[in-house]
Amino acid sequence: MRAVKIGGKLRRLRQDKRLNQAQMAAELGISPSYLNLLESNQRPVTVNVLLRLAERFQIELGSLGGEDDARLTAELMEALSDPLFDGAEVKGSDVKEVVSTLPAIGRALLAAYEAARSGAQPSASTDALEGGDVPVTLPSEEVTTFLQERLNYFPGLEEAAAALWQDNHLGLHTLHQDLVRVLAERFAVDVEIAPAASMPGLLRNFNVLTRRLSLSEMLSAPGRTFQLAHQIAFLGYRREIDAAVSRGKFTRPEADALARSAMANYFAAAVMLPYERFFEAVKQTRYDINVLQHRFGVSFEQVCHRLTTLRRPGAEGVPFHLIRVDIAGNISKRFSASGIHIARFGAACPRWNVYDAFTTPGMLRVQVSRMPDGASFFCIARTIEAPARVNARGGLPSRVGQLAVGLGCALPFAKELIYADGLSLDDPQIVTPIGVTCRTCPRTDCYDRAMPSLSQKLEIDENRRGLSTYAVTD
């Protein structure tokens, strides 16, 4: 652990506990003058003080670390890159100062900006502001934040999935039939594979009156198994789901419902890819997704999702980030444990290989990339197909949507992945310079640039043309 500056958070904690500086200093075993220096960020807090904070006030050290600050800083910079704020001349150092000293204000500004983008009214109450938990506008964003804060790991659901295996004698190669049996014997639910035309717009439908679970014939085999486990989650493990969701402070019923669905999805993944067996296979195959797909009978996306959840203490996998996009550039899923920041507002950097994947459908793309701050990442990406749709009126099927999934890690972890074999990871010629968004990226010599950089004054010379309209032509 390294020393960090947490003055704003330390001061907020003291105020929440209704302590003066002398009382807080006595609790931590330091002098009031030293505490004053810590709160004003004139001294970095040491490991010993962090440990005393965790012991005396029952707080998680992760909540005091710099990762949350870095994410909030990046998101605020992205929001402030909106042309709406062009005249404000906000500097990165200004944003870092706000996040370091007044993080609640930073979160409030972020919530207000997102509300303005969506045309909604900010839903933050005075109590929420005082507690440091400012609600965001979209329920999906609340759930994404919830998963991010818990590093996408829920031990209670892992234990529930393991209990399902043990109590019902499930088998890896008979899992689909075993889950159908569990639904019938334990929950009195009949399962049918229904014609797509009979359930337009649906992949799964559970009738609570007839106790019949209908799955669309358009689902792939892994998709059917996943939906069976998802339904079992709600029928048999709602208490565990509610316990996991209760740790989030959602502001709207829609976010609560979406979080419960996300937890049922998590449970389903833990059933299809049992932690210990999957972790052992991951280490044995060195993260070979193709082998893992066939060994566990799952899809590419399901393997990638499960890889982001391997955070069990003592049995941790590589910390990955995950992104899923459509061909228009919309980001439908994002999670980052690698340290990379994924765009929250608008399109991301077109140089990410997750976008290149659309040019070679079905082919795995590999990329070594570097952010403007020097952080380097190793990423793989591939297209996937969404479930086929059938026209309810008959005739030709609707277009099949295509998505791309990207999975990546910080470069030092790349050697653990089979996909890095044979690559000279320290060779600068294979590194692709990337950013988060065009507006926040300071690279002015980029031919992919679609918007001017926030860090460079836009100057158009009618006699010269750079690599792009907004590239500097020095």
Image (tube, rainbow, N blue to C red):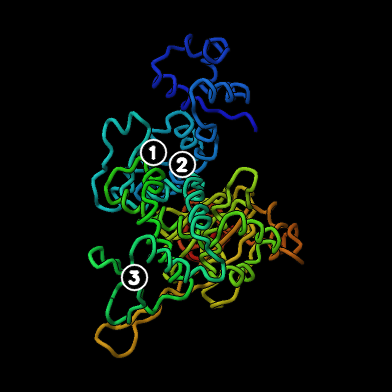
**Residue at position x 32%, y 72% from top?**
214
Q: Secondary structure at mark 1?
A: helix
Horizontal relation, residue 123 to residue 239: left or right: left
What amino acid type should be assigned to the residue bearing mark 2?
Leu
Q: Residue at x 32, y 48 (%)?
A: 256
Q: Is the residue marked by circle 3 packed among few (<14), some (14-19), or many (20+) residues within 10 Å?
A: some
* Res. 466 in view: no
* Residue sitting nearer the eye, 407 or 448: 407
Q: Quadrant of the N terminus?
A: top right
Q: Do the numbered discs 2 and 1 sit on residues whose CB atoms are within 8 Å?
A: yes
Q: Which x, y percent locates residue 306?
A: 54, 58
| Three-letter amino acid code of the residue under disc 3 | Asp
- First in sequence, mark 1 or 3: give its number: 1
What residue does disc 2 label?
Answer: 72
What residue sits 41% from the left and 53% below the top? 263
For label 1, the residue is: 107
Looking at the rendered structure, the secondary structure element under dot 2 is helix
